[in-house]
Image (cartoon, grey):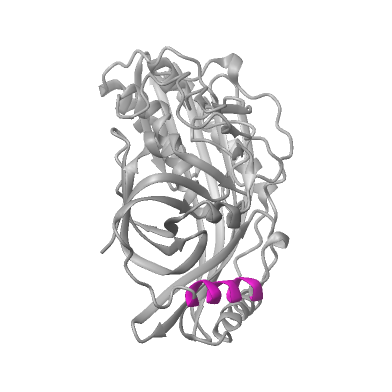
Amino acid sequence: MTQAFDAAAQQTLLESRVAVALEQARTLGADACEVGASVDQGTGVNVRMGDVESVELSRDQGIAVTVYVGKRKGSASSSDAGEASIRAVVEKAIDIARYTGEDPYAGLADAELMATEFPDLKVHHSWSLTTDEAIELALACENAGREVEGIANSDGAGLSTGEGVRVYGNSHGFLAGQRGSRHSLSCMLIARDEQGMQRDYDYSSERDPAKLSSPQTIGRSAAERTLRRLGARRPETGRLPVLFAPELASGLVGHFLNAIAGGALYREASFLCDSLGKPLFPEWFTLQEKPRQIGGMASSSFDSDGVYTRDNVFVDSGRIASYMLSAYSARRLNMTTTGNAGGARNLRIEAPLTAQADLLAQIERGVLVTELMGQGVNGVTGDYSRGAAGFWVENGKIQYPIEEFTVAGNLNAMFANLIGVGDDIDTRGSIHTGSWLIDDMTVAGS
């Protein structure tokens, strides 16, 4: 494996380099400056059919400098964070600023909004793992899946482990860093019948490697998911209820977040422009952000502007309660930053939760979608159309697998037609949600 990653030492080193860059920017005449620096180290192992296919060792670092000369902005970056390189990056950023047009909204976030408290959010967990141990875990995962009757082949299993440090500082005097880790184990398998081949996968991803699902659990789950896709047909075309599996429902939350992001709003490139206070979801639905949740996959005490993070409510009892704003987008909209430079962190839904079997029981004729393909989402109009695969549902029961169809609608109507949220919460990412049952979508099959 790679050399041990000393996160504390790396943070101290990056903080000193950011401080050097800030001082050089001041000396060279910048009115304001902000600097981000990071270093990441990781290992990835992939196996297939009992053999090792690849072992990757990676280490990346970089520094990015943004300066403000009046209302002119210049940015430059480098993968070399040595002192000579830092000076060159600062000089380049100042040169660029002198040639850019003035932007009345440019500048740092207000000094009084800088984070001042930095609790330990338990997001960094090292994993002392040798290459042989990593290979052994990946092989155990694949073998557990291949041992299931009916599995004909494998697309492989993989283990990845990574740690990193990011530091941000600006000329308000703000300088802080955060350490983090992410570890994952996955497996993809192949089954065959008279109609051809099917594949599916499963994975586990955690900050803390001790919380990963066992290799045997992941492998067997990947096999079960693959086998249940055999014998897939094309469904009928019609207006039907659609049940989105949890890992796909999180994508619907992501489309909503993109639509309330400040950048899309001030460019008037969102179907949710001027939507504050308006109903969008059912009254029983609330969407919150918990950026300081202990151990969260996206937890942080400050955003990419250095602004303190805080709990936000984006949807309150079905109504849009807040946009998602950085300092810059907030100025463009004549509003106040929500501490979301760099995106949302740890989305959580407050709603009555229903067992997936009970959601299925509400479907007389419809589909359960377990895979989506393509990028058919128009953020300006809200139109939604994706290729899909999953299962045909009739009289509240799964009947058979289906594929080669599309599900289509408009996000405005889809959110309004949300019937229920499942209790099968997927916690592997930043967005935690269960299945979503949405009424009256267009399913186009045979």
For the N terminus, the image quarter is bottom right
Residue nearest the viewer, comparing 339 with 5: 339
- Residue 76 visible, this angle: no
Is 328 above or below relative to 444? Answer: above
Give the residue drawn at x 29%, y 33%: 380
How many labels, in total? 0
Is 283 above or below relative to 371? Answer: above
Give the residue drawn at x 41%, y 31%: 90
Is 138 above or below relative to 128? Answer: below
Asked whether, in this view, residue 425 is left or right of residue 196, the answer is right
Give the residue drawn at x 53%, y 15%: 110
Q: Position of residue 422 (x, y in %)?
A: 59, 49
Q: Position of residue 312 (x, y in %)?
A: 59, 27
User: What is the quadrant of residue 224 in the picture?
Assistant: bottom right
Is 333 above or below relative to 370? Answer: above
- Residue 355 visible, this angle: yes
Provide the major secondary structure of the magenta segment. Answer: helix
Q: Which residues are magenta?
A: 216-227
Residue nearest the viewer, comparing 433 with 50: 433
Residue nearest the viewer, comparing 383 with 133: 383
Q: Position of residue 190 (x, y in %)?
A: 44, 79
Give the residue drawn at x 57%, y 84%: 148
Does 291 appear in magenta? no
For the C terminus, the image quarter is bottom left
Q: Position of residue 318 (x, y in %)?
A: 52, 28
Asked whether, in this view, residue 380 is left or right of residue 324, the answer is left
Residue nearest the viewer, comparing 374 with 4: 374
